[in-house]
Image (cartoon, rainbow, N blue to C red):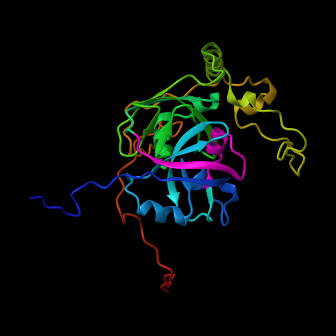
C-alpha cells in the first residue's frame, strides 16, 4: 500500500526570467537616488515581486543581467520594487559595463552564486593610492553590493570622489556572492602606475618638508598689506630702543632655519596634557617668595579719626 501526501515530492525550482527596458538611476522619477549609484543593486517593478514570491527561488535574490546584442553579462541584487511596469533602473557603471543605452532591452534571470572567498581589484587611477586604508574603504563600500562579476568595473565613492575599480579575479567562480562571507582582498597596481616615479615624487616631498621653511614657500603678498607701515610719535621724538633686536634693521636679521618638532613618543591616545610655564626670563635671579597666607594684609577704615583738643 502506498500513501500519497501533498509534500511527497519536492517543489520544482522555477527560475525568474523576464525582459525589461532599462534606464539609468538619473531617469528615476522623484528625488536623486545616490544610494543606488553607489552600489550594485537595481530597482524593479512591483509585478516582478509578485512573480518572485510565487517561485521557489533562493534568498537573497541574485539576478543575471544579459545584453543580448553585445553578449555582455553581469550580476546584481535588487534594492526596491518601485519602478514603473516594464522598466528597471540600473546604476550608471552597470549600464556602462553592459554597453546599454537608455531604453534598451535587457534580460533578467534569477541565479544562485557561490559564496566569495577571494577577490582582486585594480584601480583605474593612481589617485586611489592617496587613500590611507583602501581595504577598509572598499569593505565599507561593498556593503551596498550583493555580488561581484569578474571583468566588471565597479564605482565606489569616498570623500566626495568616485573611484573606479576593475574586478580582475574572483574565487571560487567568475561570479560570487559577497553577503555574509569572509573574503580575502588584494589590490593590483593602478593603471599607469610606475614605482620609480612614485618613489621619486615621495622623496622630493620629504626634502621640501625637511630642509625648507614652509613660510618661504608662500607667495609674496601683492597689493595692499595691512599694518606694514612705521609708527611716528606726535612729539617728534624718536622711538626708544627696548631690545637689541630693535636696534638692528629688520632686513639684516637672517631668517631662522625651520626646525621640525620632536614628537611625543609616550603619548597615550585619549589623554590631554596642559603644560604651563610660569617662570620668567630672570627667574634664576629672583629670591623665593614666602608662601601665601590668606587675610594677612592690613585693614583700613573709611572714617577719619577725630582730633582731641
Q: Residue 186, relative to residue 276: is it above or below?
A: above
Give 278 or 84, whichever is nearer the viewer: 84
The quadrant the N terminus occupies is bottom left
Left or right, 123 with respect to 27, comes to left
- Residue 249 in sight in this render: no
Which residue shows up at 61% across the image and 38% down it?
A: 163
Q: Which residue is located at x 36 percent, y 39 percent? A: 268
Residue numbers of the magenta segment: 89-113
**Visible in this render: residue 222?**
yes
Magenta span includes 94: yes
Could you tell me which residue is drawn at 84 percent across and 37 percent down? 221
Residue 203 is situated, as x and y percent measured from the top left of the image, at 62, 17
Q: In which quarter of the view is residue 9 placed?
A: bottom left
Q: Position of residue 127 (x, y in %)?
A: 63, 31
Q: How many marks?
A: 0
Left or right relative to 90: residue 186: left
Between 139 and 17, which is closer to the camera in this rendering?
A: 17
Work out whether 264 lies above or below 63. Answer: above
Q: Position of residue 130 (x, y in %)?
A: 59, 32
Is residue 265 depicted above or below 240 in this figure? Answer: above
Where is residue 55, by image quadrant?
bottom left
Q: Nearer the viewer, residue 190 or 305?
A: 190
Residue 155 in picture, x, y percent from top left:
60, 41
Residue extending farthest top: 196
- Say if the magenta span includes residue 116: no
Instruction: Give the residue at the far front of this rendering.
Output: 1
Amino acid at each position: 500500500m502506498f500513501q500519497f501526501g501533498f509534500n511527497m515530492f519536492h517543489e520544482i525550482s522555477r527560475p525568474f526570467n523576464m525582459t525589461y527596458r532599462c534606464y539609468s538611476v538619473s531617469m528615476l522619477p522623484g528625488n536623486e537616488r545616490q544610494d543606488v549609484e553607489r552600489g550594485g543593486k537595481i530597482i524593479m517593478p512591483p509585478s516582478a515581486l509578485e512573480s518572485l514570491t510565487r517561485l521557489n527561488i533562493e534568498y537573497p535574490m541574485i539576478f543575471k543581467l544579459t545584453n543580448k546584442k553585445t553578449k555582455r553579462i553581469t550580476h546584481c541584487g535588487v534594492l526596491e520594487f518601485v519602478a514603473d511596469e516594464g522598466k528597471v533602473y540600473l546604476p550608471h557603471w552597470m549600464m556602462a559595463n553592459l554597453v546599454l543605452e537608455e531604453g534598451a532591452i535587457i534580460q533578467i534571470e534569477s541565479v544562485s552564486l557561490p559564496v566569495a572567498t577571494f577577490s582582486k581589484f585594480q584601480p583605474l587611477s593612481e589617485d586611489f593610492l592617496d587613500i590611507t586604508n583602501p581595504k577598509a574603504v572598499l569593505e565599507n563600500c561593498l556593503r551596498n553590493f550583493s555580488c561581484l562579476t569578474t571583468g566588471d568595473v565597479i564605482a565606489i565613492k569616498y570623500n566626495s570622489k568616485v573611484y573606479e575599480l576593475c574586478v580582475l579575479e574572483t574565487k571560487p567562480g567568475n561570479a560570487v556572492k559577497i553577503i555574509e562571507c569572509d573574503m580575502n582582498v588584494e589590490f593590483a597596481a593602478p593603471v599607469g602606475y610606475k614605482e620609480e616615479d612614485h618613489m621619486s615624487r615621495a622623496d622630493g616631498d620629504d626634502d621640501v618638508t625637511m630642509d625648507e621653511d614652509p613660510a618661504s614657500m608662500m607667495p609674496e603678498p601683492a597689493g595692499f598689506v595691512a599694518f606694514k607701515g612705521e609708527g611716528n610719535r606726535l612729539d617728534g621724538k624718536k622711538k626708544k630702543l627696548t631690545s637689541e633686536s630693535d636696534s638692528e634693521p629688520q632686513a639684516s636679521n637672517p631668517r631662522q632655519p625651520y626646525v621640525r618638532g620632536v614628537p611625543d613618543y609616550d603619548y597615550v591616545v585619549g589623554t590631554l596634557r596642559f603644560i604651563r610655564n610660569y617662570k620668567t626670563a630672570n627667574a634664576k635671579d629672583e629670591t623665593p617668595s614666602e608662601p601665601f597666607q590668606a587675610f594677612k594684609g592690613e585693614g583700613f577704615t573709611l572714617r577719619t579719626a577725630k582730633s582731641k583738643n
